[in-house]
Image: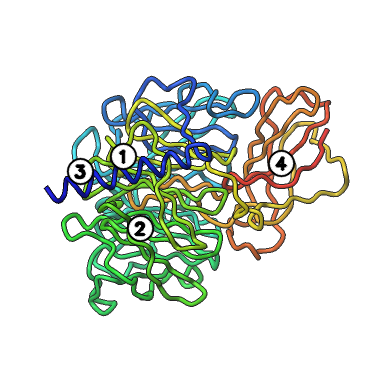
C-alpha cells in the first residue's frame, strides 16, 4: 500500500508540473509514420535519418527519413534503407557513421534473429546520395569470440574503437574486414559499460562490475588515453551506479560545461569533472526512477533530456531534464508512450533542427521540441570563408568549409552499450534564398574529429546533393549537434 500511495503522489506531482511546462516543451508525432517498429537511429551526413526495424518486424531492414523541402523532420517521408546481409538480423548492437560520409558501420548484437547469442557478425553500409544503403558483411576482429551489445566510439583522431561485450578486449577498425588490436581494459569485462569522449580526446568508462585492478571497488571508472592506447584507473564515482541484478548502467552525457552526467541503473547520478579529475554527487531521481539501460540527449539549451523508469526493464517511463547550473532533475512533458514504456526501449537523438527524435521499438516516432535557452551560444560552430560570396565547384563535390567547433563539443546522445547515435560531426544545410527550399550537403573528411572547444581551425569537405540547381544564391550553414553556425552566401 505504501508503494501505491508513493506512486500516486508522484504521478499527481508529475501532472501538476506538466501543466506548468506544457507551453514550453512539446512532443509531436511524425506526420508520416514509418508503418513498422523502429529502434536504433543514426544521423546520415546528408541530413537524412537511418532507422533500424525492430523486434516485431524484419530486423534485417533499415528505413530512411528524409526531411521535407522546408527542412522539417516532422513532415518528412520514408524510404528503404536496404537490408543487412543474409544471416544477420541483430537487436542491441553498435553503430557509427563513418567520417568519409559514405559508410555506416554496424557491429554485433545481443540477439540475432531473436536468439541471445551475442553475435560477432557485422556489416558495412554504403550510402547512395539521395538513395538507399547497400550492406555487405564485415568480419569481426580475429581474436574476438563475441561483440554482442558492446559499445563503440569514434576518437578525436578519427579511429573507430569497438569493444567486445563479453571480455576486456577492444579493437580499432582498419577498413572493411580489417581490425587492429588494442589494449584491454583493467576491469572484469566491457559488459554494460559505455564510452564517453571527453574534450581532451580521452575516453571515460564507468565499470559495471567491481574492478579488482582499481581497488576492487563498485565505484570504479577507467580512462583511455589515445596517445598510448592504454587504460588506467579513473576516480571513483560518488555512489554505485550499476544494479546488482543485471549490472546495467544508464547513459553518460558530456555537457557543454565539459562535465559528464552519469545516470545509474539505480536511483542515483554522479557528475565527472575532467578538469579536477573527480566525481561529485548528482541529484537523486524522484519516485524510484532510474535508467537500467536508457537514453539521454543534450538539448540545445544545455539541459539533458533523460528517459527514466522504475526498476529494471519495468514500465512507468518519465521524461526528465537535468539542469547543470542548479544540479537538479525535473520532470518534463511526456510523449504518449509514457508511462507504458520502460526506459530501455527508448532512443533519443538530436536532429539538425535542434529537436530530439524518440523511437521506442514501436511504430510511432515522436519529436521533442525543447524550450529555448542560452546554454548553446558558446558551443555553436563558426564558419569562415574567403569573401562575402562563396562559390560551389562546377561538379558540386569537395567544396571546402573552414571554421571552429565543426564537430560540436559533445557526442550529444548516449545510451551505454546497446546503442550509439553520436552526432558530433558537421551537417551542411543549404537554403535557396529565393524559394526557401532546403537542401543538404554531404559532409566528409573533416580535418579533425575533435570536440575540444579550443581545438582551433578545422576544415570539412561537402558535396552538393544530386540534381542540385546551381545558379541562385544560397544561405549555407554548418550544424553540429542541432546547433547552427553563422551563415555564408554561396552561388
Give the total number of marks visible in the rendering: 4
Report which residue position mark 1 lands on.
345
Q: How much space separates mark 1 and mark 2, taking CA atoms? A: 16 Å
How far across and how far down the image is residue 99, in percent? Answer: 56, 47
Q: Are marks 2 and 4 in contact (CB under 8 Å)?
A: no
Given contact means CB atoms under 8 Å apart, are the residues at marks 1 and 2 in contact? no
Secondary structure at badge 4 equals strand
- The residue singled out by tag 2 in the image is 263
The mark found on residue 117 in the picture is 3
- Any part of residue 143 in sight: no
**Around disc 1, counting alpha carbons within 10 Å, would you say few (fewer than 14), some (14 to 19), or many (20 or more)?**
some
Which numbered disc, 3 or 4, marks the residue that appears first in the sequence? 3
SS at badge 2: strand
The answer to whether any part of residue 321 appears in the image is yes
> Closer to the camera: disc 3 or disc 4?
4
Near-viewer residue (265 or 146): 265
Which is nearer the eye, 118 or 434? Answer: 434
Q: Which residue shows up at 27% across the image and 52% down it?
A: 287
Amino acid at each position: 500500500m505504501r508503494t501505491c500511495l508513493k506512486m500516486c503522489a508522484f504521478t499527481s506531482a508529475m501532472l501538476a508540473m506538466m501543466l506548468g511546462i506544457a507551453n514550453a516543451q512539446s512532443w509531436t508525432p511524425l506526420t508520416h509514420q514509418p508503418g513498422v517498429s523502429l529502434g536504433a537511429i543514426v544521423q546520415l551526413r546528408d541530413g537524412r535519418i537511418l532507422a533500424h526495424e525492430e523486434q516485431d518486424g524484419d530486423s534485417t531492414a533499415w528505413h530512411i527519413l528524409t526531411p521535407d523541402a522546408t527542412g522539417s523532420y516532422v513532415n518528412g517521408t520514408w524510404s528503404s534503407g536496404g537490408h543487412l546481409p543474409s544471416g544477420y538480423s541483430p537487436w542491441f548492437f553498435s553503430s557509427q557513421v563513418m567520417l568519409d560520409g559514405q559508410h555506416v558501420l554496424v557491429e554485433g548484437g545481443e540477439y540475432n534473429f531473436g536468439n541471445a547469442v551475442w553475435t560477432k557478425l557485422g556489416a558495412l553500409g554504403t550510402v547512395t546520395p539521395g538513395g538507399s544503403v547497400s550492406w555487405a558483411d564485415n568480419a569481426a576482429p580475429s581474436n574476438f569470440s563475441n561483440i554482442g551489445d558492446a559499445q563503440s566510439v569514434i576518437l578525436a583522431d578519427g579511429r573507430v574503437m569497438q569493444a567486445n561485450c563479453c571480455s576486456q578486449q577492444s579493437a580499432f577498425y582498419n577498413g572493411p574486414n580489417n581490425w587492429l588490436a588494442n589494449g584491454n581494459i583493467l576491469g572484469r569485462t566491457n559488459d554494460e559499460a559505455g564510452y564517453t569522449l571527453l574534450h581532451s580526446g580521452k575516453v571515460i568508462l564507468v565499470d559495471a562490475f567491481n574492478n579488482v585492478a582499481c581497488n576492487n571497488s563498485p565505484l570504479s571508472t577507467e580512462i583511455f588515453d589515445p596517445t598510448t592506447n592504454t587504460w588506467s584507473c579513473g576516480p571513483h564515482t560518488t555512489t554505485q551506479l550499476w544494479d546488482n541484478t543485471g549490472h546495467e548502467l544508464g547513459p553518460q552525457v558530456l555537457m557543454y560545461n565539459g562535465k559528464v552526467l552519469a545516470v545509474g541503473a539505480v536511483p542515483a547520478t554522479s557528475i565527472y569533472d575532467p578538469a579536477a579529475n573527480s566525481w561529485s554527487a548528482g541529484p537523486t531521481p524522484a519516485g524510484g526512477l532510474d535508467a537500467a539501460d536508457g537514453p539521454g540527449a543534450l538539448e540545445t539549451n544545455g539541459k539533458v533530456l533523460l528517459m527514466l523508469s522504475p526498476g529494471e526493464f519495468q514500465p512507468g517511463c518519465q521524461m526528465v531534464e537535468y539542469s547543470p547550473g542548479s544540479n537538479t532533475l525535473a520532470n518534463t512533458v511526456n510523449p504518449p508512450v509514457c508511462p507504458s514504456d520502460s526506459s530501455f526501449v527508448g532512443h533519443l537523438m538530436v536532429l539538425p533542427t535542434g529537436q530530439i527524435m524518440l523511437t521506442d521499438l514501436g511504430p510511432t516516432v515522436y519529436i521533442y521540441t525543447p524550450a529555448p535557452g542560452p546554454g548553446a551560444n558558446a558551443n555553436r560552430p563558426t564558419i569562415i570563408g574567403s569573401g562575402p560570396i562563396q562559390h560551389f565547384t562546377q561538379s558540386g563535390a569537395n567544396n571546402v568549409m573552414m571554421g571552429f567547433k565543426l564537430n560540436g563539443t559533445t557526442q550529444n546522445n548516449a545510451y551505454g552499450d546497446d546503442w550509439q547515435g553520436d552526432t558530433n560531426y558537421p551537417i551542411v544545410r543549404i537554403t535557396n534564398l529565393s524559394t526557401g527550399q532546403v537542401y543538404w550537403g554531404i559532409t566528409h573528411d573533416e580535418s579533425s574529429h575533435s570536440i575540444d572547444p579550443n581545438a582551433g581551425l578545422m576544415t570539412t569537405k561537402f558535396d552538393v546533393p544530386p540534381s542540385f540547381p546551381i545558379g541562385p544564391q544560397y544561405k549555407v550553414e554548418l550544424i553540429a549537434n542541432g546547433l547552427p553556425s553563422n551563415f555564408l552566401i554561396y552561388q
